[in-house]
Amino acid sequence: MVPVAWRILLHDKVRLAITLAGITFSVVLVLVEVGIYLRILTNSSLLIDTSDADVWVTARDCRNFDFSLPFDATKAEAVRSCPQVARVEKLIMTWGLARLPTGGSEQVQIIGFDPWKATGPLTDLVSGDILDLKTPRGVVLDESSRRRLGPFQVGDYMEVTGRRVKVVGVSQGIHSLTTSPMLFASYATAQEIPSPVLPGQTVFVLAWLKDGADRAQALATLRRIPDVDVHTRGAFSLKTRLYWTFETGMGLGFLMVTFMGLAIGMVMVGQTLYASTMQHQREFATLKAIGAENRMIYGILVRQAASVALAGYAVGLAATHGVARLYGEATDIWVILPAPIQAAMLVLTVLMCMAASLISIRKVMVLDPMIVFKA
Amino acid sequence: MEPLVQVRGLDKTYRQGRVEVRAVRGVSLEVRPGEVVLVMGPSGSGKTTLVSMIGCLLRPTAGSIRIGGQEVAGLGEAQLPAVRRRWIGFVFQTFNLFTSLTARENVEVAFNLRGVTGPEAARRSAEILAQVGLAGRAEFPSADLSGGEKQRVSIARALAGDPPLLLADEPTANLDAATGRAVVSRMTSLAREKGKAVVLVTHDPRVTEFADRVLTMEDGALVAGPAREASA
Ligand SMILES: Nc1ncnc2c1ncn2[C@@H]1O[C@H](COP(=O)(O)OP(=O)(O)O)[C@@H](O)[C@H]1O
Ligand SMILES: [Mg+2]
């Protein structure tokens, strides 16, 4: 078969370029937007997800990981006394101000817990040893924080909210939702740094259940402890993600940009395909006159839409990777593009271009083949 | 020989709001295989309307059209494309080539429509282009061809799939006199060679010599005209 659809597309290269640019723009906008959103969500619950605790005990009505009220640390004993619980850790999540060598300051997110083994995101430190957090005023910083805090390495001292701390380890790949540097310390060190967490308080209690323990029963027992909420790890992670998605308007913002990206793409593609159809309408009428069935002519338009969708998507995906790298380098927010999202975007792109071709299809549907006789 | 085309009492009234234009009135004619019939007449006399109806592109208001013995005037929209593919090849005043295709591909599309595809379609397209004297132009972009060459491509396209009837509406109007004559000469001689009937609408008195019969239209009706003896 003569590839009429492609020939018409390739005939006007400028128009084709505009069409592809429109799709590429759409794909990049949507994928980068969704990728940033996914990264922010991942970051928002990173420490929950990478902890291996079965249960997170929080203050009543705690809404997310980052801003949670401290409560009486003796609740940890109540948790420990639950027969299904094997082990309990207190975890402080609070905020401090780091003094920079330049004289300025940066807000840091302080995570205080007693490390009993290298775990979660702290499994492979770039340098130092996680267990050194047990030394007085020892802290671990993430290498990504150098962007904010300036250069540091194991052995350096630093001032956080008026307390001198010593860097005993450097982690990698730990980003906070707020992009503030994360500072890991022992529970005791975190208590010593002035913050809203008063002596004798904790922010979370993490519990590990005994092997083979009945989870439902354990949760029911724990939920009898007054003035705290009890979440499984998954539930607390989801709660945190939903908080950032809905309570802050972030989700709606991302959704709107995504929708606009698709809408702009559709308008551009629709416009160029329609202009092309109008320009070639005499040819479509000729096809009708010489005996083409309508569905063959629609087939040409659908094939055009599908072709530009696939080509635009391919260019867009490649461009997305480039943009994502630049964006990551500039902001340290590294876009996440899971395969299902890429696949969904491909489907969306094809649907968008198909929808865009509908006005062209309508045009040729009502096209009068008699125009072939017009001079 | 059985007539290929039999038109009886054909009428066409265009309606535009309250205005009615009776473009064709009571036309009857017959065209036999291998016969070249010229339809002449002043502008607006209904020539294009007549060939459009014979070509199954326009529905008559009244009357009957039989092509190859089949009544087509009453056929539904869905059946007409197949009738056009089976029986009719069109040649237009403005050529109506597919501008983004080569000369050969323009012909090939007509084969594709008839289910002939791939190398077979390419080979047969090249063959017909050679018959219209365009062997050396087959791979040219159709947009780069001269007017006469374009019209010869369109004749080749009309011949693809071997339809028994060629309908040509003012095929020389966009060509200079010599080129127009040459094109009609080639079309009519090829048609005779292949036993095809031709209905050729034209203004151009210089091409009457290629016709077996000349019909004249005036105000939508056929009038007695300068007829030539059939050569067949
Ligand atoms: N679509 C149409 N609507 C209304 N009137 C038309 C239409 N097409 C043609 N006519 C009229 O019908 C008459 C015959 O037109 P046409 O068949 O094109 O004549 P010719 O081809 O001989 O010049 C003219 O008066 C023309 O204005
Ligand atoms: Mg006319």
Image (cartoon, helix red, strand yellow):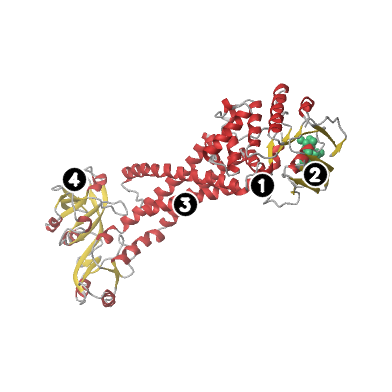
Give residue B180's position: percent from left, percent from top: 71, 25
Residues marked 1 and 2, same chain: yes
Residue displayed at 71% across by 21% down = B178
Crowding near the residue tagged with mark 3, few <14, some 14–19, many ≥20 C-alpha atoms within 10 Å: some
Give the quadrant of the N terminus of chain A: top right
Q: Write down the residue under mark 2.
A: B7
Give residue A307's position: percent from left, percent from top: 49, 44
Task: Say left or right for A351 vs A339.
Answer: right
Residues marked 4 and 2, same chain: no
Instruction: Examine the image and state in which quarter residue B37 appears.
Output: top right
Gap between marks 2 and 3, in whole Å? 53 Å
Task: Inspect the image, locate mark 2, and give the three-letter code of the amino acid beneath it.
Answer: Val
Q: Going by the picture, which residue comes out furthest to the top?
A: B178
Q: Quadrant of ligand 2?
A: top right
Q: Using the image, tell me which numbered label, if any, was put on residue A152.
A: 4
Callout 3: chain = A
Q: Going by the picture, which residue comes out furthest to the left?
A: A135
Task: Inspect the image, locate mark 1, and give the three-letter code of the amino acid beneath it.
Answer: Pro
Q: Write down the residue under mark 1.
A: B81
Callout 2–callout 3 Cβ contact below 8 Å = no
Crowding near the residue tagged with mark 2, few <14, some 14–19, many ≥20 C-alpha atoms within 10 Å: many
Crowding near the residue tagged with mark 1, few <14, some 14–19, many ≥20 C-alpha atoms within 10 Å: many
Task: Inspect the image, locate mark 4, and give the three-letter code of the amino acid beneath it.
Answer: Phe
Gap between marks 1 and 2, in whole Å? 20 Å
User: Which mark is nearer the camera, 1 or 4?
Assistant: 1
Callout 1: chain = B
Gap between marks 4 and 2, in whole Å? 97 Å
